[in-house]
Amino acid sequence: MPTKRFLFFGLIMISLTGFSQTPDSIYLTSIKTPQLFLRGNQLAYPILPLNGNEQLQLSFDDIDADVKNYYYTYQLCNADWTATQLSGFDFIKGFSQVNISNYRLSSDALVRYTHYTAMIPDQNCIPSRSGNYILKVFLDGDTSKVALTRRFLVVDNRVNVSPQLLQPYNPLISRSHQKLQLNINTRELNIMDPAQQIKVWILQNDRWDNAIHDIPPTFYSGNTVQYNRDEDFVFPGGTEWRWLDLRSFRYQSDRIQRADYLKESTTIYVKPDVDRSQLPYFYFKDYNGHFFVQTTESINAYWQGDYARVRFSYVPPNNNPFPDKDVYIIGQLTDYSYNDSTHMQFNAERGMYETYLYLKMGYYNYDFVTVDKNDPLKKPSFEITEGNHNETENDYTILIYYRSLSGRADELVGISTLNTVTGK
Protein backbone atom coordinates (compact mmCIF):
# COMPACT_ATOMS: atom_id res chain seq x y z
CA MET A 1 0.00 0.00 0.00
CA PRO A 2 2.72 2.61 0.84
CA THR A 3 4.41 1.84 -2.49
CA LYS A 4 1.19 2.58 -4.38
CA ARG A 5 0.72 5.85 -2.49
CA PHE A 6 4.27 7.00 -3.26
CA LEU A 7 3.84 6.05 -6.91
CA PHE A 8 0.60 8.06 -7.05
CA PHE A 9 2.38 11.03 -5.41
CA GLY A 10 5.17 10.83 -7.99
CA LEU A 11 2.78 10.71 -10.93
CA ILE A 12 0.94 13.77 -9.62
CA MET A 13 4.15 15.78 -9.29
CA ILE A 14 5.39 14.75 -12.75
CA SER A 15 2.07 15.98 -14.14
CA LEU A 16 2.32 19.28 -12.27
CA THR A 17 5.92 19.91 -13.29
CA GLY A 18 5.17 19.30 -16.94
CA PHE A 19 2.07 21.50 -16.97
CA SER A 20 2.77 25.21 -17.31
CA GLN A 21 0.57 27.84 -15.65
CA THR A 22 0.87 31.55 -15.21
CA PRO A 23 0.87 32.53 -11.53
CA ASP A 24 -2.23 34.38 -10.30
CA SER A 25 -4.54 33.22 -13.06
CA ILE A 26 -8.14 32.03 -13.36
CA TYR A 27 -8.80 29.11 -15.71
CA LEU A 28 -12.53 28.53 -15.11
CA THR A 29 -14.87 31.37 -16.05
CA SER A 30 -17.14 30.52 -13.12
CA ILE A 31 -14.41 31.39 -10.58
CA LYS A 32 -14.71 34.90 -9.11
CA THR A 33 -12.86 36.92 -6.45
CA PRO A 34 -9.99 34.53 -5.67
CA GLN A 35 -7.91 35.69 -2.70
CA LEU A 36 -4.87 34.31 -0.89
CA PHE A 37 -3.65 36.34 2.08
CA LEU A 38 -2.19 36.06 5.55
CA ARG A 39 -4.95 34.78 7.79
CA GLY A 40 -6.98 37.64 9.24
CA ASN A 41 -5.58 40.36 6.96
CA GLN A 42 -6.86 40.65 3.38
CA LEU A 43 -4.25 43.30 2.57
CA ALA A 44 -1.23 41.20 3.67
CA TYR A 45 0.82 39.49 0.97
CA PRO A 46 0.83 35.66 1.33
CA ILE A 47 4.20 34.99 2.96
CA LEU A 48 4.90 32.09 5.32
CA PRO A 49 8.00 31.54 7.48
CA LEU A 50 9.55 28.12 6.93
CA ASN A 51 8.51 25.73 9.71
CA GLY A 52 6.36 28.42 11.30
CA ASN A 53 2.80 28.33 12.65
CA GLU A 54 1.25 31.05 10.49
CA GLN A 55 -1.45 30.23 7.95
CA LEU A 56 -2.78 31.71 4.75
CA GLN A 57 -6.44 31.97 3.86
CA LEU A 58 -7.64 30.93 0.42
CA SER A 59 -11.11 31.99 -0.66
CA PHE A 60 -12.98 32.10 -3.94
CA ASP A 61 -16.52 31.97 -5.33
CA ASP A 62 -17.99 29.72 -8.02
CA ILE A 63 -21.00 31.33 -9.69
CA ASP A 64 -22.18 27.99 -11.07
CA ALA A 65 -23.67 27.85 -7.54
CA ASP A 66 -23.29 24.09 -7.25
CA VAL A 67 -20.93 21.97 -5.16
CA LYS A 68 -17.72 20.83 -6.81
CA ASN A 69 -14.81 18.71 -5.60
CA TYR A 70 -11.95 21.20 -5.48
CA TYR A 71 -8.45 20.21 -4.38
CA TYR A 72 -5.19 22.12 -4.04
CA THR A 73 -1.50 21.35 -4.18
CA TYR A 74 1.78 23.29 -4.44
CA GLN A 75 4.43 23.72 -7.11
CA LEU A 76 7.87 24.97 -6.04
CA CYS A 77 9.33 27.52 -8.44
CA ASN A 78 12.61 29.34 -8.92
CA ALA A 79 12.99 33.09 -8.47
CA ASP A 80 11.70 33.70 -12.03
CA TRP A 81 8.63 31.49 -11.45
CA THR A 82 9.81 28.64 -13.64
CA ALA A 83 9.00 25.27 -12.09
CA THR A 84 11.90 23.53 -10.39
CA GLN A 85 12.94 20.05 -11.44
CA LEU A 86 12.62 18.77 -7.88
CA SER A 87 10.24 15.96 -6.98
CA GLY A 88 7.28 16.77 -4.79
CA PHE A 89 8.93 14.64 -2.10
CA ASP A 90 11.58 17.38 -1.90
CA PHE A 91 9.23 20.27 -1.07
CA ILE A 92 5.98 18.84 0.34
CA LYS A 93 5.78 17.15 3.72
CA GLY A 94 2.75 14.87 3.87
CA PHE A 95 0.14 14.30 1.19
CA SER A 96 0.43 15.88 -2.24
CA GLN A 97 -3.11 17.28 -2.44
CA VAL A 98 -5.86 18.43 -0.10
CA ASN A 99 -9.62 18.49 -0.64
CA ILE A 100 -11.29 21.88 -0.07
CA SER A 101 -14.17 20.75 2.09
CA ASN A 102 -15.19 24.09 3.58
CA TYR A 103 -17.87 25.71 1.42
CA ARG A 104 -21.14 27.57 1.80
CA LEU A 105 -23.94 28.44 -0.59
CA SER A 106 -24.61 32.17 -0.90
CA SER A 107 -27.65 33.80 0.65
CA ASP A 108 -29.20 37.28 0.62
CA ALA A 109 -27.57 37.94 -2.77
CA LEU A 110 -29.16 38.25 -6.20
CA VAL A 111 -26.22 36.43 -7.77
CA ARG A 112 -26.05 32.84 -6.62
CA TYR A 113 -22.64 31.34 -5.93
CA THR A 114 -20.78 28.86 -3.75
CA HIS A 115 -18.08 30.28 -1.50
CA TYR A 116 -15.04 28.06 -0.83
CA THR A 117 -12.35 28.66 1.76
CA ALA A 118 -9.30 26.80 3.09
CA MET A 119 -6.53 27.49 5.58
CA ILE A 120 -3.06 26.83 4.19
CA PRO A 121 -0.95 24.93 4.91
CA ASP A 122 -3.04 21.99 6.04
CA GLN A 123 -1.28 19.97 8.74
CA ASN A 124 -1.10 17.05 6.29
CA CYS A 125 0.39 19.02 3.37
CA ILE A 126 3.16 21.43 4.37
CA PRO A 127 5.80 23.19 2.20
CA SER A 128 9.16 21.91 3.42
CA ARG A 129 11.53 24.23 1.54
CA SER A 130 11.78 27.99 1.21
CA GLY A 131 11.10 29.62 -2.14
CA ASN A 132 8.39 30.70 -4.55
CA TYR A 133 5.27 28.55 -4.63
CA ILE A 134 2.25 28.36 -6.89
CA LEU A 135 -0.92 27.19 -5.18
CA LYS A 136 -2.91 25.22 -7.75
CA VAL A 137 -6.63 24.61 -7.27
CA PHE A 138 -8.07 21.87 -9.48
CA LEU A 139 -11.15 19.70 -9.90
CA ASP A 140 -11.91 16.09 -8.98
CA GLY A 141 -8.34 15.20 -8.01
CA ASP A 142 -7.30 15.67 -11.65
CA THR A 143 -4.34 18.08 -11.85
CA SER A 144 -5.06 18.78 -15.53
CA LYS A 145 -8.37 20.42 -14.56
CA VAL A 146 -6.84 23.58 -13.14
CA ALA A 147 -9.37 26.13 -11.83
CA LEU A 148 -7.07 28.87 -10.53
CA THR A 149 -3.51 29.56 -9.41
CA ARG A 150 -2.15 31.94 -6.76
CA ARG A 151 1.41 32.83 -5.76
CA PHE A 152 2.77 32.63 -2.24
CA LEU A 153 6.21 32.75 -0.65
CA VAL A 154 7.92 30.65 2.01
CA VAL A 155 10.95 32.35 3.56
CA ASP A 156 13.83 30.98 5.61
CA ASN A 157 15.32 34.20 7.00
CA ARG A 158 19.09 33.73 6.87
CA VAL A 159 20.31 37.11 5.64
CA ASN A 160 19.97 40.65 6.93
CA VAL A 161 18.79 43.19 4.32
CA SER A 162 19.24 46.96 4.79
CA PRO A 163 17.30 48.89 2.11
CA GLN A 164 17.46 52.65 1.68
CA LEU A 165 15.19 54.96 -0.32
CA LEU A 166 16.88 57.67 -2.39
CA GLN A 167 15.91 60.30 -4.90
CA PRO A 168 17.32 59.31 -8.31
CA TYR A 169 20.52 61.11 -9.24
CA ASN A 170 19.42 61.57 -12.86
CA PRO A 171 17.80 65.04 -13.02
CA LEU A 172 15.49 63.88 -15.83
CA ILE A 173 13.67 61.49 -13.50
CA SER A 174 14.48 62.81 -10.04
CA ARG A 175 10.97 64.32 -9.61
CA SER A 176 9.07 61.34 -11.02
CA HIS A 177 10.90 58.18 -9.91
CA GLN A 178 12.02 56.43 -6.71
CA LYS A 179 15.29 54.57 -6.20
CA LEU A 180 16.41 51.90 -3.73
CA GLN A 181 19.86 50.71 -2.76
CA LEU A 182 20.69 47.68 -0.63
CA ASN A 183 23.25 46.14 1.68
CA ILE A 184 22.97 42.40 2.35
CA ASN A 185 24.74 40.55 5.14
CA THR A 186 25.26 36.92 4.04
CA ARG A 187 27.11 35.65 7.12
CA GLU A 188 24.89 32.57 7.46
CA LEU A 189 25.35 31.49 3.85
CA ASN A 190 28.24 29.79 2.10
CA ILE A 191 28.81 32.36 -0.66
CA MET A 192 31.60 31.70 -3.13
CA ASP A 193 30.28 33.78 -6.04
CA PRO A 194 27.62 36.38 -5.08
CA ALA A 195 26.97 37.35 -8.70
CA GLN A 196 25.88 33.77 -9.45
CA GLN A 197 24.46 32.61 -6.13
CA ILE A 198 22.45 35.66 -5.01
CA LYS A 199 19.39 37.00 -6.85
CA VAL A 200 17.47 40.10 -5.82
CA TRP A 201 13.88 40.86 -6.79
CA ILE A 202 12.15 44.08 -5.74
CA LEU A 203 8.38 44.48 -5.91
CA GLN A 204 6.52 47.77 -5.87
CA ASN A 205 3.17 47.41 -4.06
CA ASP A 206 3.30 43.59 -4.34
CA ARG A 207 3.29 43.75 -8.14
CA TRP A 208 5.19 41.20 -10.22
CA ASP A 209 4.40 42.78 -13.60
CA ASN A 210 6.93 45.60 -13.07
CA ALA A 211 9.36 43.90 -10.66
CA ILE A 212 13.06 44.74 -11.05
CA HIS A 213 15.47 41.80 -10.92
CA ASP A 214 18.65 40.28 -12.36
CA ILE A 215 20.76 43.22 -11.21
CA PRO A 216 24.39 42.25 -10.50
CA PRO A 217 25.92 43.41 -7.21
CA THR A 218 27.96 46.61 -7.25
CA PHE A 219 30.43 45.43 -4.64
CA TYR A 220 30.99 42.49 -2.34
CA SER A 221 33.56 41.86 0.32
CA GLY A 222 33.48 39.24 3.04
CA ASN A 223 29.88 38.87 4.15
CA THR A 224 28.63 42.13 2.61
CA VAL A 225 26.95 42.43 -0.78
CA GLN A 226 26.03 45.94 -1.98
CA TYR A 227 23.72 47.22 -4.72
CA ASN A 228 24.15 50.97 -5.11
CA ARG A 229 24.67 51.89 -8.77
CA ASP A 230 22.85 55.07 -9.81
CA GLU A 231 20.76 53.34 -12.48
CA ASP A 232 19.72 50.23 -10.49
CA PHE A 233 16.37 49.62 -8.78
CA VAL A 234 14.70 52.78 -10.10
CA PHE A 235 10.88 52.70 -10.28
CA PRO A 236 8.37 55.18 -11.70
CA GLY A 237 6.63 56.64 -8.65
CA GLY A 238 3.08 56.61 -10.01
CA THR A 239 0.50 58.47 -7.95
CA GLU A 240 -2.00 57.53 -5.26
CA TRP A 241 -4.42 54.89 -6.56
CA ARG A 242 -7.95 55.62 -7.66
CA TRP A 243 -10.65 54.10 -5.48
CA LEU A 244 -14.14 52.67 -5.66
CA ASP A 245 -16.29 51.91 -2.62
CA LEU A 246 -18.69 49.05 -3.40
CA ARG A 247 -19.34 48.00 0.18
CA SER A 248 -23.03 48.69 -0.42
CA PHE A 249 -25.04 48.59 -3.63
CA ARG A 250 -28.02 50.39 -2.05
CA TYR A 251 -26.15 53.33 -0.53
CA GLN A 252 -24.02 54.59 -3.38
CA SER A 253 -20.62 56.16 -2.72
CA ASP A 254 -19.69 59.45 -4.38
CA ARG A 255 -17.68 57.62 -7.09
CA ILE A 256 -20.83 55.99 -8.49
CA GLN A 257 -22.71 57.77 -11.26
CA ARG A 258 -25.80 55.56 -11.26
CA ALA A 259 -26.96 51.96 -10.90
CA ASP A 260 -29.47 49.73 -12.66
CA TYR A 261 -31.24 47.40 -10.22
CA LEU A 262 -32.75 44.51 -12.12
CA LYS A 263 -34.63 41.50 -10.82
CA GLU A 264 -31.64 39.15 -10.96
CA SER A 265 -28.60 41.43 -11.31
CA THR A 266 -27.13 44.87 -10.68
CA THR A 267 -25.14 47.08 -13.05
CA ILE A 268 -23.13 49.95 -11.58
CA TYR A 269 -21.73 52.85 -13.60
CA VAL A 270 -18.64 54.50 -12.13
CA LYS A 271 -18.20 58.20 -12.76
CA PRO A 272 -15.81 58.70 -15.71
CA ASP A 273 -12.18 59.00 -14.62
CA VAL A 274 -10.13 61.82 -16.13
CA ASP A 275 -6.46 62.19 -17.01
CA ARG A 276 -4.25 62.91 -13.97
CA SER A 277 -0.87 62.99 -15.70
CA GLN A 278 -0.53 66.78 -15.61
CA LEU A 279 -1.88 67.33 -12.10
CA PRO A 280 0.42 68.20 -9.18
CA TYR A 281 0.98 65.52 -6.58
CA PHE A 282 -1.73 65.21 -3.94
CA TYR A 283 -1.60 62.73 -1.06
CA PHE A 284 -4.59 60.74 0.12
CA LYS A 285 -4.77 57.38 1.83
CA ASP A 286 -4.98 54.43 -0.52
CA TYR A 287 -4.31 50.69 -0.38
CA ASN A 288 -1.59 50.64 -3.05
CA GLY A 289 -3.61 48.78 -5.66
CA HIS A 290 -5.22 46.19 -3.36
CA PHE A 291 -8.84 45.38 -2.63
CA PHE A 292 -10.74 43.77 0.23
CA VAL A 293 -14.14 42.11 0.44
CA GLN A 294 -16.39 43.92 2.91
CA THR A 295 -19.88 45.35 3.35
CA THR A 296 -21.29 48.22 5.37
CA GLU A 297 -24.41 46.18 6.08
CA SER A 298 -24.90 43.55 8.77
CA ILE A 299 -24.14 40.56 6.58
CA ASN A 300 -21.17 38.27 6.04
CA ALA A 301 -19.43 39.64 2.96
CA TYR A 302 -17.86 36.31 2.01
CA TRP A 303 -21.04 34.34 1.42
CA GLN A 304 -23.75 37.03 1.53
CA GLY A 305 -22.02 39.82 -0.39
CA ASP A 306 -23.55 40.40 -3.82
CA TYR A 307 -21.96 40.86 -7.24
CA ALA A 308 -22.43 43.62 -9.79
CA ARG A 309 -21.38 44.29 -13.34
CA VAL A 310 -19.35 47.48 -13.02
CA ARG A 311 -18.57 49.85 -15.89
CA PHE A 312 -15.31 51.80 -15.71
CA SER A 313 -14.51 54.60 -18.14
CA TYR A 314 -11.43 56.72 -18.73
CA VAL A 315 -11.52 60.07 -20.54
CA PRO A 316 -8.32 60.80 -22.53
CA PRO A 317 -7.23 64.38 -23.23
CA ASN A 318 -9.53 66.08 -25.77
CA ASN A 319 -11.59 62.86 -25.93
CA ASN A 320 -9.21 61.43 -28.51
CA PRO A 321 -7.80 57.88 -28.39
CA PHE A 322 -4.08 57.41 -27.80
CA PRO A 323 -2.32 56.57 -31.09
CA ASP A 324 -0.50 53.20 -31.10
CA LYS A 325 -1.36 52.50 -27.46
CA ASP A 326 -3.75 50.20 -25.64
CA VAL A 327 -5.34 51.19 -22.34
CA TYR A 328 -5.81 48.69 -19.49
CA ILE A 329 -7.35 48.88 -16.05
CA ILE A 330 -5.02 47.40 -13.46
CA GLY A 331 -4.83 46.56 -9.78
CA GLN A 332 -5.21 43.49 -7.64
CA LEU A 333 -8.81 43.35 -8.90
CA THR A 334 -7.45 42.32 -12.33
CA ASP A 335 -4.34 40.42 -11.11
CA TYR A 336 -2.30 43.03 -13.04
CA SER A 337 -3.06 41.07 -16.20
CA TYR A 338 -3.06 42.50 -19.69
CA ASN A 339 -5.65 40.63 -21.73
CA ASP A 340 -9.10 41.01 -23.26
CA SER A 341 -10.83 41.17 -19.88
CA THR A 342 -8.76 44.16 -18.70
CA HIS A 343 -8.39 45.88 -22.08
CA MET A 344 -10.46 49.06 -22.45
CA GLN A 345 -12.28 49.74 -25.72
CA PHE A 346 -12.54 53.29 -27.05
CA ASN A 347 -16.14 54.47 -27.40
CA ALA A 348 -16.00 57.13 -30.14
CA GLU A 349 -19.53 58.36 -29.42
CA ARG A 350 -18.72 59.07 -25.75
CA GLY A 351 -15.07 59.98 -26.39
CA MET A 352 -13.73 57.67 -23.70
CA TYR A 353 -12.33 54.21 -23.02
CA GLU A 354 -14.67 51.68 -21.38
CA THR A 355 -14.73 48.21 -19.90
CA TYR A 356 -16.86 46.14 -17.54
CA LEU A 357 -15.66 44.10 -14.56
CA TYR A 358 -17.68 41.67 -12.46
CA LEU A 359 -17.01 42.65 -8.85
CA LYS A 360 -18.12 41.56 -5.39
CA MET A 361 -19.04 43.97 -2.62
CA GLY A 362 -15.85 45.51 -1.26
CA TYR A 363 -13.39 48.38 -1.52
CA TYR A 364 -11.17 48.56 -4.61
CA ASN A 365 -8.07 50.42 -5.76
CA TYR A 366 -7.38 50.66 -9.48
CA ASP A 367 -5.50 52.68 -12.09
CA PHE A 368 -5.21 53.00 -15.85
CA VAL A 369 -2.04 52.29 -17.80
CA THR A 370 -1.02 52.39 -21.43
CA VAL A 371 0.88 49.68 -23.27
CA ASP A 372 2.63 50.18 -26.60
CA LYS A 373 0.77 48.13 -29.22
CA ASN A 374 4.11 47.01 -30.66
CA ASP A 375 5.56 45.96 -27.30
CA PRO A 376 5.51 42.13 -27.04
CA LEU A 377 6.39 42.38 -23.33
CA LYS A 378 3.34 44.59 -22.64
CA LYS A 379 5.30 46.94 -20.40
CA PRO A 380 2.78 49.17 -18.60
CA SER A 381 3.19 52.92 -18.16
CA PHE A 382 1.47 55.45 -15.88
CA GLU A 383 3.06 58.38 -17.67
CA ILE A 384 0.17 59.66 -19.81
CA THR A 385 -2.77 58.42 -17.72
CA GLU A 386 -1.86 58.85 -14.05
CA GLY A 387 1.50 60.64 -13.92
CA ASN A 388 4.59 59.81 -11.85
CA HIS A 389 5.75 61.57 -8.69
CA ASN A 390 8.75 61.08 -6.46
CA GLU A 391 6.58 61.88 -3.41
CA THR A 392 4.07 59.05 -3.97
CA GLU A 393 3.52 56.68 -1.04
CA ASN A 394 4.56 53.18 -2.15
CA ASP A 395 5.47 49.90 -0.47
CA TYR A 396 8.56 48.02 -1.63
CA THR A 397 9.31 44.37 -0.89
CA ILE A 398 12.88 43.13 -1.31
CA LEU A 399 13.28 39.40 -1.91
CA ILE A 400 16.69 37.71 -1.60
CA TYR A 401 17.20 34.33 -3.26
CA TYR A 402 20.17 32.01 -2.84
CA ARG A 403 21.34 28.85 -4.57
CA SER A 404 24.20 26.76 -3.31
CA LEU A 405 26.79 25.62 -5.82
CA SER A 406 25.22 22.16 -5.84
CA GLY A 407 21.63 23.37 -5.43
CA ARG A 408 18.82 22.60 -7.86
CA ALA A 409 16.38 25.34 -6.79
CA ASP A 410 16.42 28.96 -5.64
CA GLU A 411 15.85 29.37 -1.90
CA LEU A 412 14.15 32.47 -0.49
CA VAL A 413 16.50 33.47 2.34
CA GLY A 414 15.50 37.04 3.12
CA ILE A 415 12.63 39.52 2.91
CA SER A 416 12.62 43.19 3.79
CA THR A 417 9.96 45.85 3.29
CA LEU A 418 10.19 49.62 2.97
CA ASN A 419 7.46 52.24 2.87
CA THR A 420 8.40 55.50 1.16
CA VAL A 421 6.63 57.62 3.79
CA THR A 422 7.42 55.85 7.06
CA GLY A 423 10.82 54.50 5.98
CA LYS A 424 9.95 51.12 7.52
Image (spheres, rainbow, N blue to C red):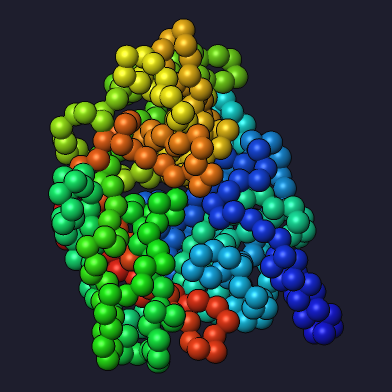
Q: Is residue 74 visible?
A: yes
> In the visual, does 368 lie left or right of 114?
left
Q: Visible in this render: residue 108? A: no
Left/right of residue 235 with respect to residue 9 in the rendered view? left
| Quadrant (top left, top right, bottom left, bottom right) of the C terminus | bottom left
| Residue 279, position as x, y percentages in the image | 19, 29
In the image, 413 versus 344, the foreground residue is 344
Where is residue 157 drawn, in percent x and y?
Answer: 37, 79
The outermost residue toward the top is 349
The residue shown at (62%, 81%) is 90
Instruction: Give the vertical position of 222 relative to 396 (above or below).
Output: below
- Image coordinates for residue 161, horizontal then vertical, percent: 27, 75
Residue 369: where, in percent of width, then height? 39, 35
Residue nearest the viewer, comparing 84 with 415: 84
Q: On the image, which quarter does residue 86 sit in?
A: bottom right
Number of labels in the image equals 0
Q: Name which residue lies at 77% across and 80% down.
A: 6
Q: Is residue 202 left or right of residue 67?
A: left
Residue plotted at (45% across, 30% down): 325
Residue located 25% across and 40% down the image: 388
Location of residue 80 with respect to 245 vertically, above or below: below
Q: Which quarter of the figure has residue 289?
A: top left
Closest to the observer: 97 or 118?
97
Image quadrant where one finds the N terminus: bottom right
